[in-house]
Image (cartoon, helix red, strand yellow):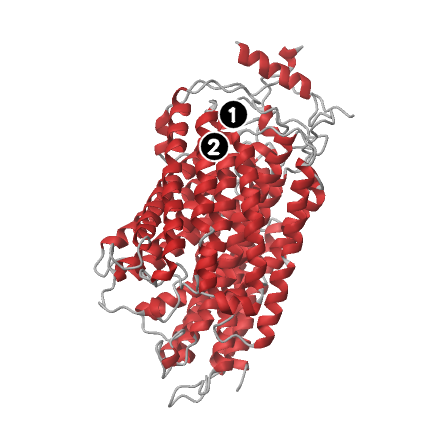
Amino acid sequence: MTSTIPLPQSEPEQSWTRYFGFNTDAKVIGIQYIVVAFFFFLIGGFLAMIIRGELITPAADLVDRTVYNGLYTMHGTIMLFLFIFPILNGLNNLLIPTMIGAPDMAFPRLNAVAFWLVPIFGSLLIASFFVPGGPAYAGWWSYPPVSIQNPLGNLISGQGLWLVAVALSGVSSIMGAVNFVTTILRMRAPGMGFFRMPVFCWTALAAQTLQLIGLPALTGGAVMLLLDLTAGTSFYRPEGGGDPVLYQHFFWFYSHPAVYVIILPVFGIFSELFPVYSRKPLFGYVYVSLASFIIVGLGLVVWVHHFFPSGVPEWMRNLFMFTTMLIAVPTGVKVFAWLGTIWRGKLQLTTPMLFCLGGLINFVFAGITGIMLATVPIDIHVNNTYFVVGHFHYVIYGAAVMGIFAAIYHWFPKFTGRMPYEGLGKLHFLLTFVGANLNFLPMHPLGLMGMPRRVSSYDPEFAFWNVLASLGAFLLGVSIIPFLLNMISSWARGPRATHNPWNAIGLEWLLPSPPPEDNFGEHVPTVISRPYGYGLGEPLVEHQAEIEQALILQEAT
Amino acid sequence: MTGTPIPPPGQVIAHSEGQHASHNLTGFIIFLCSESVIFLAFFSGYAVLRLAALDWLPAGVDGLEWRMPLINTVVLVSSSMTMVAAEHFKGKEKIWLFRAFWLLTMAMGAYFLYGQAVEWSGLKFGFTSGTFGGTFYLLTGFHGLHVATGILLMGLMLVKSFIPGNYSGGEEGVKATSLFWHFVDVIWIILFVLLYVWRA
């Protein structure tokens, strides 16, 4: 009977050179994104190592002060625009088409162009290290008036290159967002209504909607900044009637939602993985899905909490404190849904599950300090101190990066056809979890004691916590070694992966590992139930048993 | 459980062109929504700067001349109507009438740009004349860029209409261009109100 089942066939091994060219296959682009993003992660991480090396002693003894300004500016910019966004777009490229049963993205060529912009603006940004005057030094948020100074008077300045790179990053992200949203809206498998869609797709849709609404505001603001810097306008120059706080509004109108662009897909990853490794359906699927869009709505009206001390009127402070606190509600819905999912589940502590659990713990901690920061009196006290840096890094490294690692370990067998090594993976987890907490926890007491961010020398009373933080940072640096070893060696000669090594439920697990170029091609299965039916015994698609049997047979031969 | 028949192996259902075309229109509408936020950012920036300004007008400037821009506005708004007419004729498969009205729309767009250029050349303030000059040139310039893009798109569609068989069914490119043109039109109306009608 299996012979009547139209099955996606594994294709003969394709040349690895396809990863180096203009390829329109979403699965190739996905891996291109992830590898390029990881390359920039290493550069951004190297800068962080220098920063923490400088901060291990109270004196400014390792690098020059102006160099230090460039270091933290570039660290932040590279990590956000060249690591986190591209790597998430990589996951989107791999997961969205396979999860919804589409052969590719809606606009494959646009997809490839969006990817190739990343190495272009990445090189531009790195090149700014070598222009006279060095790279941008106004911090990753690039506030005027610092960012509109051009003391050397050259047309090509570090700040100018920074702005061009960020603008190109925006173009690439908008291209990606149009593509992802169109794909999710129009190319789902038959029978996959919105409430049968995997939560990762919900969160990707929510995150990309935020990109579409928020990013143009930053682009508008950045155009005005570039004109102030190069053309002599005075949009943000108080001496010409301009308003520097206006830029802060533009910047944070996008850059606060940008944090949700990062964390929402990670919520999606948690929602995908907890059911798999707890062997239970996702608790409150509908609420988890809808909470993403409540976060989108609220996330667009909280931006002012980033600059409470910048001469913001009282009513605005109160309003934005309220909305910021309100956003804890949909986020809390998700956290409790994950707890409900793992509650009394049959937990399997695999590497991806460990990363999810660690990420969840860090995220809850970051959420608590987030509520503290939302409170105006506390915020005014700790604004621009290490407390904010600590909170932010708990969200981004502690939760988002750990979630991304979880996703990489979980879907690695699907897209490479090889199993990653568990031992190296668990070592990677241990080093990451301990390193991240050792690095970022001491920043909270430092901030409360009043240590300002962005300075290379500090009072000796802050030394103890700084030494701890630096040790944590070096541990994080070391943690990348087992990860790299694991990825390279298991991709080259790891054990062959079956189509569904984790016993997971989802359309992507009904494809061979690695999937053929057009995924299901013309034979997209019809979805007949909600996702995450663990332990319920319901098939996800029609003819599921036959499809699985055929896949097993195919693997045996 | 209602089973869908499984197509026999080897039978390939060709992707219909219409399916892909509708993706294009969806994608374009999503892009337009996103693009409108840039204008929203510029509008709100303009409003914030203007409301906070002590001396909005630079020395020697006593406001903007509104008659010429009003003529421009009338031309641009009418061009949206000629475009609707063009689309109507395309629907009736009167392809030459479509081309005629399409070309008329392009001409009106070009006239708008010409009027804008004339206005710019007669102004007594420049790009660097405080936030008044900066926002004026930023808003009109960025909008003008969109008008020029719209004219280019229309030109492209006009050329495409001469390729045989292209316009037999629904042509998504024409729909997208027309949406873009209406968008540019609506943006101009808001801009006109903000720049010329709003008096201190």
Q: Mark 2: few, some, or many residues within 10 Å (few <14, many ≥20)? A: many
Q: Nearer the viewer, residue A496 or A551?
A: A496
> Real-space Cα distance between discs 2 and 1?
9 Å
Any part of residue B104 in sight: no
Q: Same chain for labels 2 and 1? Say yes or no.
A: yes
At horizontal 41% and vertical 61% (from top left) the residue drawn is A141
Amino acid on which the number 2 mark rests in the picture:
Lys
At horizontal 61% and vertical 30% (from top left) the residue drawn is A277
Q: Which residue is mark 1?
A: A515
What is the chain identity of the residue bearing mark 2? A
Q: Nearer the viewer, residue A428 or A58?
A: A58
At horizontal 66% and vertical 36% (from top left) the residue drawn is A342
Q: Which residue is mark 2?
A: A27
Any part of residue A345 in sight: yes
What is the chain identity of the residue bearing mark 1? A
Q: Which type of secondary structure does the marked residue at label 2 adopt? A: helix
